[in-house]
Image: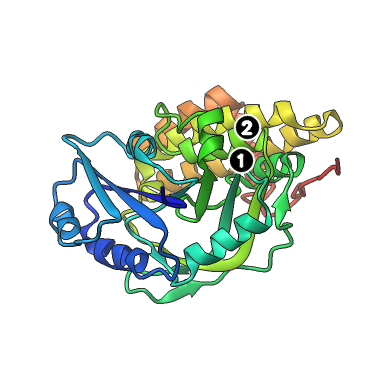
């Protein structure tokens, strides 16, 4: 029984897959299994994976593409480790990534999940952004995690820097397969309802940034809006009553203004289809005319900003 089960969904990932796999195989901490789930890939991903003759690698596949969160759930069902380490086909682990994460987990045995900082690299592997100074504590209690996610969104910033205790997944459930882009954010919210989570401030991975990533596709933006509103409702219900109204106003002034900004960008670029989709989605969340007026008055949100208001437990 390995300490760590690394789960790696693969979909048309041949461009960066070999580098990603090599970074796992060469880890200084070797007590892991790697569960690769090929999600209906149509490129050479399968051939690349089959070249690795390592007993720690287990390969499964879907005949057709099922999506990220369905594939993650299928892989997790096969996981035998105490910790489930999420991973991505584009990214690279630094040599001591798993070792440092396991040392952190031993130091904080009661956390439900952990996430680490990361360096962002471009298509060629050049570092284009390092982590900013972050005052988030090593252990984040549920009350603080709720407020951070309400104001700033998904607390981890990604999915490839996350490890989750398997027993916690058995308790809170697996990823929501009805969500297209926010199933990971939804998972963090459900975990932090019951557990503190850990933050490893040392960057342990290289996170790849490129134009083909799903989160950067315009066509999924309205799904992001819809799913984000569902998650925000969950978070608001968990806030201390003293800041609920302030938080609701913050959502309008920040999150909804971001939607207006996206809609305006689509109009300027001639993408009328996504501009109309965004307008209709905004109608379900707020008064679009009022929000466009606020967008203009605040100079695209640059003036009269609301700052996050935290309330200590």
Is residue 226 visible in the rendered image? The answer is no
The image quadrant that residue 130 belongs to is bottom right
Does residue 11 lie above or below 290 as drawn? Answer: below
Q: Secondary structure at mark 1?
A: helix
The residue that label 2 is drawn on is 232
Dot 2 and dot 1 residues touching (CB under 8 Å): yes
Q: Which residue is mark 1?
A: 255
Residue 58 is situated, as x and y percent measured from the top left of the image, at 26, 49
Near-viewer residue (108 or 302)? 108
Question: x, y (%) of residue 20?
Answer: 32, 63
Residue nearest the viewer, comparing 196 with 186? 196
- Give the left or right position of residue 13, taking residue 140 as reference: left
Which residue is at 61% across, 27% downward?
286
Quadrant occupied by the C terminus: top right
Q: Residue at x 21, y 59 (%)?
A: 14
Question: Can residue 234 be seen here?
Answer: yes
State the residue at coordinates (48%, 70%): 96
- Of labels 2 and 1, earlier in sequence is 2
In the displayed structure image, the side of residue 274 where residue 191 appears, left or right: right
At x 61%, y 26%, the residue is 287
In front: mark 2 or mark 1?
A: 2
């Amino acid at each position: 029984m390995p300490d760590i089960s690394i789960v790696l969904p693969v979909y048309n990932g041949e461009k960066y897959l070999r580098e990603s796999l090599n970074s796992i195989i060469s880890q200084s901490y070797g007590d892991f299994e790697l569960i690769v789930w090929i999600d209906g890939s149509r490129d050479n991903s399968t051939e690349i994976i089959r070249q690795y003759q390592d007993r720690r690698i287990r390969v499964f596949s879907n005949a057709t593409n099922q999506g990220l969160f369905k594939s993650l759930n299928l892989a997790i069902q096969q996981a035998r480790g105490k910790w489930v380490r999420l991973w991505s086909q584009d990214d690279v682990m630094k040599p001591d990534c798993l070792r440092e994460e396991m040392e952190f987990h031993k130091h904080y045995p009661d956390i439900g999940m952990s996430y680490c900082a990361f360096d962002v690299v471009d298509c060629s592997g050049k570092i284009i952004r390092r982590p900013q100074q972050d005052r988030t504590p090593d252990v984040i209690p549920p009350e603080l995690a709720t407020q951070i996610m309400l104001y700033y969104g998904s607390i981890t910033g990604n999915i490839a820097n996350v490890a989750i205790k398997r027993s916690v997944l058995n308790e809170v459930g697996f990823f929501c397969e009805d969500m297209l882009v926010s199933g990971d954010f939804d998972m963090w919210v459900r975990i932090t309802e019951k557990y503190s989570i850990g933050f490893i401030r040392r960057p342990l991975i290289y996170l790849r940034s490129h134009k083909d990533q799903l989160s950067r596709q315009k066509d999924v933006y309205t799904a992001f809006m819809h799913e984000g509103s569902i998650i925000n409702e969950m978070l608001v219900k968990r806030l201390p009553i003293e800041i609920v109204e302030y938080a609701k106003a913050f959502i309008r002034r920040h999150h909804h203004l971001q939607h207006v900004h996206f809609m305006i960008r689509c109009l300027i670029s001639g993408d009328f289809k996504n501009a109309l989709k965004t307008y209709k989605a905004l109608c379900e969340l707020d008064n679009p005319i009022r929000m466009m007026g606020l967008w203009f008055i605040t100079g695209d949100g640059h003036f009269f900003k609301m700052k996050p208001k935290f309330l200590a437990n």
